[in-house]
Amino acid sequence: MKTKILNFSLVAALGLMTQSCTKDFLNVPSKEIVEAEDSNVVYEPESFVNAIYGMFTDWNYAFSFLGITEIISDNADKGSSPTDTGTDKDILDNLTYTSTAGSFAAMWEHWYKSIGRATQAIEYTENFGLTDEAYKNRLIGEARFLRALNYFYLVRGWGDIPLQHIDLIDRKPTEEVYQFIEEDLLFAIDHLPLKSQYASKDLGRATKGAAQGLLAKVYLYQKKWNEAVNMARAVINSGEYDLEPDYATVWRESTENGRESLFEFQARGEVIAHGIQQYSQTQGARGATGWGWGFNTPSQNLLEAFEAEGDQIRKNATIIFRGETLYDGRVVGESVENPMYNEKAYSSANGGADDTDKNLRYLRFAEVYLILAEAANELDDFATARQYLNLVRNRVSLPAITSNNKDELRQLIWKERVSNWQWNMTDGST
Amino acid sequence: MDGRLKFDQNVNLTLTKNTPKPLNAFNAAYRQSPLVPVMYANGRYGVPFVNKTTGFVTYEGQPGDNIGSLNSIGNPVYEVLRNNNLQNTTTLQGSFEGEFKIVDYLKFNSRFGATKFWYNGRTFNNIKHGWLNADPTRTESEFETLRTNNPTSTSYAYNSLNISQNESFRWVWENFLTFQKSFDRHHVEAILGMSREKFDIASSMSASAYDVPEKEQYWNIDLANSSGSSAYPKTVNQTSYTPIALASYFGRIQYNYDNRYYLTATVRRDGSSVFKANENYWGTFPSFGAGWTISNEEFMQEASWINFLKVRANWGELGNQQIPLNVSQILTSPGSSNYNYVFGPEQTLVFGAAFGTPAVDLTWEKTREAGVGLDFGFLNNNLSGSIDYYHKLNTNTILDVTPTLNSSYARNFYAHGAKVLNQGFEAILTWSKTLSEDFNYSFGVNYAYNSNKVKEVTPAYDGATGGSLANGQITKQLRVGQPIYAWWMWEADGVWQTAEEIANNPRYGSPIPGHLRYKDQNEDGVIDNRDKVFFGSYIPSSTYGINLAVNYKKVDFAVYGYGVAGNKVYNALKGTRIDGGENITAETFKQRWTGPGSTNVHPGAARDSYASSYYLESGSYFRINNITLGYTFSRLYSNTSKLRLYVTAQNPFIFTKYSGFSLKYRECRKQLQA
């Protein structure tokens, strides 16, 4: 019996010596990860589009992003405790940073990786063989909208930048980058459904209105006033949007994806469906009775801007004050470490949890009004400028502007943006 | 079969049970301020709250007092208490070997071995308890309110339970023919063989759920959501892993003539499944050796003090295939990740996917090694030892490369990208002497010197960084001409003494007097990454050891020691911290900067959190790792019966200038437990 086993193993050993057999032995199929060559067996194009949106939920948006868009501005301070630098938030706040500050690298990388996902999703969708042309173009339109959104961050931050599909090192002139953004957005406008045309389950995807609103802003940044006016009017005339009547609710869960919303970063705030990781935590009140790290606090400058304007409504909706009782009944103790915190990042349900249910409002209808007002003013159409500026002011019970002076109106429109914390990188408005 | 066939087998079963405690608690115990109480009067565990108005370390104060945090370190007692892990493992190991002697000088061996491993883990987390103990002012009713208002948020579940089970299997099968024969003064041994191996044949499953009954006996996933009011999701994750397969053919011929001239030739052909992406599975690795035992030559017989003298030389190539599976992949995640998103009025989860970084063609990592050596025995073999020199060039080191920041791909990928040279020498010297039947002793030393240097890096991969301090600071970089991943950071250049000094010199951030000052290496007036410089390696250049053994009559005594030198260690203890308010050593306290002119070396009580050479210390140490004293009773009940009693001290002494505790972290930990 034992001899037989040995004989068998001898024969088997000889068998294994042949190369073809060994090749099968070594060609071990991958189990836990799907190999790229099998992608079309496993994944629909929509998966790849979803993952571009997914980039909005990363930790980078909860910290580095705040550093280079808000803490660096006059509207916000680093916050937290004086000894906690937040890696580089102190030097950003004090404007003593250099180009090697980590937050810049983090967002530069994050935006380019998002662009990479968009380009891959577009190619994958084009080649997948979808027969429903409208659906195919919608998916490509979503990806192109998201690619434009990310390039818009980059071009505003750095000016001349590489276009990823052309070369990774060679920087293209700002105008060329803007042209690429415009092409993506025009495609998106032509192929994306209106907000109301989407199935309910798709609420939160990029819409025609979002693409028009973003393009209006892109035109505004290039001082293409006529085009900006036309795009802003297209959003307004679509009839899809309106201002929320009560400004106080604009940053709360009840108005998420509501009538005023053109585009938001979605967040449910649960494990798996997590939202921007730690977004509410990094900005939550710090110390006893607090729930967060206390970064990105409203500046004295911002507070004074509200108070000079007598803008109680927006002040209270934007700033959490030490000792305040919030709308949901949460008591912010007298003993928290900083005098003010960012209420726009406050999540009633999740507090200081790692996951947040706070949708980040990327583009709101009120901003479209301000874009129209600013562009119209530059075209000397003061009546239109005042009309839309006053629509925004009227909601928060501020007196109407009557000025007929172009420079003065421009300053007033800008102040309307500034007096609203979270400057133009995220949501410059109202 | 006339005894020409032999079999051998064995089976081993190992069971373990473990209730691991978090390593972090050790760190917290060291760093947490002694001012923070273990427990408050109201029964809550201490947290590092401080009343910044009064300066007392407490969460209490008058209305309007500013209560902040002393630091961000946990409560070590609570961390141990809160950690409720249970791990069980079972390992079953077996092997079977058959040997068949075909003729006297030729035999065939076949060997099969296999190991099966099971793991069971259980983690219980009392979420409510954790929430309440994060802040002594929190109340149960607040928790209940939050729970009621946010019925789907697992932050307000009472507890969570995770059960995980892994199993893995590996086997190896080897067959070889051995030929051994002497013809006159020619001695030949030859081996020809093959092997097959497969490992990481594994899978894991884990399940999580919330609100299981509080009593341990009921910690089952099926009893989750026991509180009636809860309906938290149960999640299951299961994965089978990709095994790794290795196939090898090998042959070796050893020849010696008259025990004077030796030749060895070996060739291996190895195949590994990790190179599947380009089906470039195979690598061939030859090696050759030659030796000459000079002491066996006629002409050496005169030199009676030389007992043994042999010179050796070798050349060969070695292969390494230890890289994770390298395929172009699609990235997805069943958990919280940036591949997934939510849409719809109820913010329903949708899963997404992204393309991973395309796999780069890889093949075996090859190290070319050449060496010469000398073995000797002098003075009746009382003095013996060896000296070796080696030169090892890793010709195509596989690096874990981070893609360019603005490329499409995010995931690190593996690529051949560097040549790394290790060269050095090793020497062993032993003196042993038997003075009488009752007394003998031996004393030995060994020493090895190694120099590690990156000779070449593919330009795009140069400058990869590592050594994260987990606060955004990194401490190592890969650069040609330096040891691999050498220390790379700012050079501490004294301490800022006055605000005026700060204002008039290049600085980083917003330093205050007492902070460390960093050197503007490129003299461009700003301090940034371009001012970071290299500070040597974490790899010791010298390692050495001693051993001493004495036998006198029935007593035996032995001491072993070893040491390293030439390496540097980043002192994480003295190291960067975001907050002050931590427990520090008395030395750190005494040495600190206290005002202009007090010291230009050590920072003050307030310090920044940037990595710098201030925190690098020599990692040299010498350790006595074993002292044994024994006594042997012989002829207890028969002539051959013996009993030896001995006492051993493990790691009793260490000599080092290093001031931290993480030098040999685990060993230190053992000592403290002992």
Image (cartoon, helix red, strand yellow):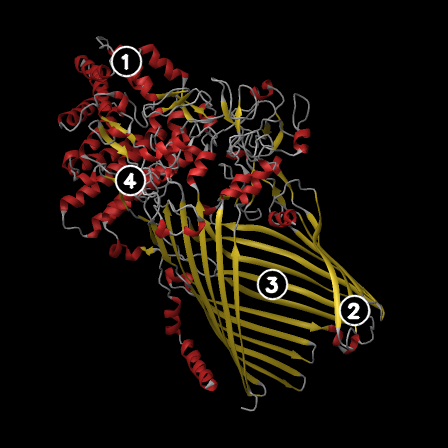
Q: Nearer the viewer, mark 1 or mark 2?
A: 2
Q: Which residue is mark 2?
A: B633
Q: Amino acid at mark 2?
A: Phe
Q: Earlier in the sequence, mark 4 or mark 1?
A: 4
Determine whether the residue tagged by mark 1 lies in a helix, strand or loop. helix
Q: Amino acid at mark 4?
A: Tyr
Taking B141 as reference, is A202 above or below it? below
Of residues B587 and A66, which is closer to you in this image?
B587
Of residues B609 and B362, which is closer to you in this image?
B609
Tell me: B657 left or right of A237. right
Which numbered disc covers residue A412?
1
Q: Earlier in the sequence, mark 2 or mark 3?
A: 3
Q: CA distance from mark 1 to mark 3?
A: 78 Å
Q: Amino acid at mark 3?
A: Ala
Q: Which residue is mark 3?
A: B370
Which numbered disc covers residue B350?
none
Tell me whether marks 1 and 3 sit on the same chain.
no
Q: Chain of mark 1?
A: A
